[in-house]
Image (cartoon, rainbow, N blue to C red):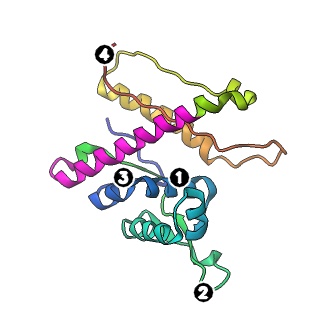
Amino acid sequence: MKPVDRPGIRTVTDAKALSAMANPFRSRMMDALKVDGPSTASALATRTGQAVGSASHHLKVLHEAGLVEEAPELAKDRRERWWRLVDAGTRWSRADFADDTAAVTAAYAAEALGLQRQFERTQEWNANASSAPDWDAAAFATQNWMRLSPDELTDVANEIVDVLLRWSSRPVPDDGVERESVYVFARGFPAQP
């Protein structure tokens, strides 16, 4: 069984896109575009702690990989350049690249970067959770042991992704409640206790 194809979620099939995503600054820029929406290189540089020239370079690489595109309708004048994500999300499977060593290497690098960033974000939250008691009470972590076949694990993954996509793509209610960006991740893979 394969993961469900979802509108707006790009299945990455080339090493160029994987390599582009395997860079920490580019990955953070894509996250900022996902959370904040379209942005300029200057705003992305500020958001990710890099020089404007560096942000522009990384945007060019992401653009050449087909991951971001210009949003000219947002520019106030001809000098201003706005950028947005091409797709709401990406997915890939190393199995799709079995004959392309460079793509498999890039996929591992992108996955390693993602795992490192998940770990760092979790450490940062744990170090600062006591300063936000309401959020500390709402935050969660879960882990479960299950006995599954590969098809069943795919079903579990599809259900989890469906829930996360439903919440991330919903219209945010205009009810006066203050909302923060919330980071949720889950992984599932065969392992032994």
Where, quadrant-wise, is the C terminus in this rendering? top left
Q: Which residue is mark 2?
A: 78
Q: Main secondary structure of the magenta part?
A: helix
Measured from the top left, where is residue 76 in percent x and y?
A: 68, 81
Residue at screen point 60% across, 30% down: 127
Q: State how far apart marks 2 and 4 are (Cα).
A: 58 Å
Earlier along the polypeptide chain: callout 4 or callout 1?
1
Q: Which residue is mark 4?
A: 192
Q: State how far apart marks 4 and 1 are (Cα).
A: 32 Å
**Disc 2 vs disc 4: Cβ atoms closer than 8 Å?**
no
Q: State how far apart marks 2 and 1 are (Cα).
A: 26 Å
- Regarding residue 88, the answer to whether it shows in the image is no
Q: Amino acid at mark 1?
A: Asp
Earlier along the polypeptide chain: callout 3 or callout 1?
3
Q: Secondary structure at mark 2?
A: loop
Q: Range of the magenta residues?
A: 97-124
Q: Of tags 3 and 4, which is closer to the observer? A: 3
Q: Which residue is mark 3?
A: 22
Earlier along the polypeptide chain: callout 3 or callout 4?
3
Measured from the top left, where is residue 136 in percent x and y?
A: 68, 27
Q: Amino acid at mark 3?
A: Ala
